[in-house]
Amino acid sequence: MAVAFLKVTIALCFSWPPPKTANKFQVICFKTLRFLLCMNVIILIVPVTYTLYYNNYDLPKITKLWCLLGAFTQVPLQISLFALQYDRLQNVISEMEHNFKCAKIHEKDIYQQYADKCVPFYAGCTFAVFLTAITTSLVTPLITVDQIFPTEAKYPFNVKHEPIKTLIFVHQFIVIWQCFSTRSTIADKTQFMILWTTGLMEVYACAWPADHLMDA
């Protein structure tokens, strides 16, 4: 259950590669979606940069735009880093999932104890992060008079006509969702979970000979 929850929350940052048993079509789909969603963020970086270049020296607006630019830039950067570590992540995650699947009853109880201790904290943090994403994306345009999109990015063409207005709104909403998915607490702790599981496997490997001698 914890692994499935982790996969869902970090789906848009593509830090969880398909298993080794995945066929060629599944791998191609994964890498294609990863590339398209990476480009999706880069496309929004362009109008944000354009808005900064043609700003009216409104300090609060400039500060907000620089924060957005920094957050958006981290998404393709982190996706690229995960892509470079694709084989390593796939090997470690495959071993981790195999360890979960083949664990004995008392070992599964230990895993469940760790999961139960972490569920309230991580579930609460994840809920707060994605609630903020929804609020930022949907509520901000409703309460701001001169803002019709989730961000204050400006475009060098008319965006108040349909279907351009809807397309841009959906595009910005997806990018913000990607940003919060990448920077959420669960996404940041993916590496920690993998390292923790690897360390736990090593403890079992070191402890097994002693248990075997005690049984003998």
Image (cartoon, rainbow, N blue to C red):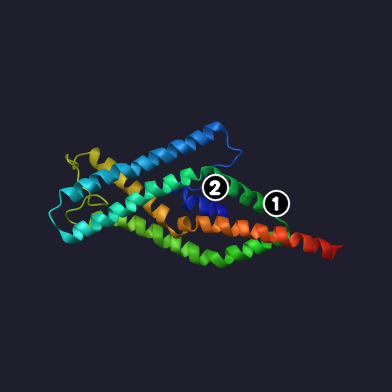
Question: Which amino acid, by three-letter code, is at mark 1?
Answer: Cys
Residue 80 disc label: none
**Location of mark 2 (residue):** 89
- Image quadrant where one finds the N terminus: bottom right
Can residue 16 be seen here? The reply is: yes
Alpha-carbon neighbours of circle 1 within 10 Å: few (<14), some, or many (≥20)?
A: few
- Image quadrant where one finds the C terminus: bottom right
Residue 102 disc label: 1
The image shows residue 182 at horizontal and vertical percentages of 41, 52
Q: Quadrant of residue 47?
A: top left
Quick one: which residue is furthest to the left in this view?
56
Q: Are discs 1 and 2 less than 8 Å apart at CB?
A: no
Can residue 138 be seen here? The reply is: no
Residue shown at 45%/60% (left/top)?
185
The image shows residue 111 at horizontal and vertical percentages of 64, 61
Q: Which sits in the foreground, 130 or 83?
A: 83
Relative height, residue 165 to residue 102 (above, below): above
Q: Which sits in the foreground, 16 or 85?
A: 85
- Nearer to us of marks 1 and 2 is 2
Q: Is residue 155 left or right of residue 211?
A: left
Residue shown at 42%/57% (left/top)?
184
